Amino acid sequence: MIKRATCTVLVALAAVYGAAACSGDAARGSKAPSPPALPASAPSADAPPQPQATAPSLEPQAPDRSVAWRAAADYSRALDGEFLFVMQDGKVVFEDGLPGWSRSRPHALASGTKSFTGVAAMLAVQQGLFSLDDIVSETITEWKSDPRKREITVRQLLTLSSGIEPDTAADRKRTRMIAAGSEAQRLQALAEKRDDFHAQALQAPAIHDPGARFDYGSNHFFAFTEFLERTLRARGIKPDTAWEWYSKNLFDPLQIRVARIGRDRQGNAQVAGGASLSAEEWAKFGEFVRQGGRVRAADGSDVQVLRTELLNQCFEHSKCNDRYGLTWWLGPRGAAGEIPTVWMAAGMGKQRLYIVPSARMVAVRFAPLNSERSAFSDTRMLKLLLEALGEKAIPFGEVSARPGLPIN
């Protein structure tokens, strides 16, 4: 009797596990291994009822990407990186920093500050304050007497193709001291307060015809903020200073906290390179851009702060530089699906805000301001980040013969 009951139990278990495996096959679309054959036996009336066994759940396991993330962090650190912060779908997926660093510690963005102006300009366009093709000299009337300056448009200021001298000799010297000077020279250059950014830009000579060439520098930005402020004052709009207008219309709706903005002796904000933000706050800005000008409100709803079609004009390749849009650096072009779209705000010392829409990724990278001459490569950094996110391999190496992503 015991022998017969044992055989009956084995048969029952074989039937149960066989059914579970078939059910799993249907759900997973894959063939489960067959259970070992058991000797047949007739059911026994005196065998105790057997509990119904359930096949163990086979949930797919997420791949371990810790090695890939470590490779990305090690690469950044090896080239002076201080902090690396990565978001996907609006959620933090990775962060790594040297001792003392965290996502909430502010860092100088240097020229990473510039990209706020492009987005703020499109907010002004949305509000009907001006259009990108407006002639600036209609507002900055002292430019009317100069045959080149009188033709400059708002778009040309924001694509750095206005033709005015981009920086003064003093600007260039100060940049060299910060990037490669001794510690004493660097601290002195950082502490130096300029006289008047706006007057400097308005007095800068026109060295090229408007729209003739790309010339990277700060004067385009200072001329734009003077134009914006005169436009605001002519309409009686408050606040009527550029950075305060940015704060009300851009930073406040996004709940972005700017730790610091540099100013000249007249109180004009250094919109071309004077902001300090934490990685967390800069990434908020990147996420707003990735989401097409939307931000999540406290009640969980989405608020369209800037219309997507206007924001997207920041990422149209400009005529004078295929890698630059409206105050944003753009990644290399490639065939569809070959190279991902990359939007980047970049500052001296390899400060970076990367946005890769296809990977739903926003990433921030901080480093010392004097690490500008390091061998850090944007294409290498992006490749490692995308691999860590599990994105398909991107053949960045195939475009290495073309000009790479910019250094600043």
Image (tube, rainbow, N blue to C red):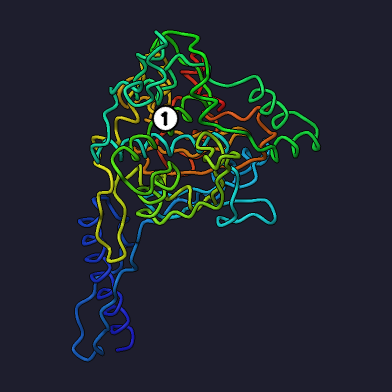
**Residue 370 or 387: which is nearer the viewer?**
370
**Horizontal and vertical percent position of residue 181:** 77, 30
What's the residue at 42%, 29% (across, down)? 224
Q: Quadrant of residue 126?
A: top left
Quadrant (top left/top right/bottom left/bottom right) for the C terminus: top right
Quadrant (top left/top right/bottom left/bottom right) for the N terminus: bottom left
Q: Can residue 72 be seen from the camera position used here?
A: no
What's the residue at 56%, 49% (across, down)? 260
**Residue 332 or 163: which is nearer the viewer?**
163
Task: From the viewer's perspective, tell me whether residue 187 is left or right of residue 314.
Answer: right
**Horizontal and vertical percent position of residue 264:** 59, 38
Up/down of 324 relative to 35, above or below: above
Q: Quadrant of residue 175?
A: top right
Up/down of 137 relative to 53, above or below: above
Q: Can residue 408 be seen from the camera position used here?
A: yes
Residue at label 1? Answer: 224
**Residue 384 or 33: which is nearer the viewer?**
384
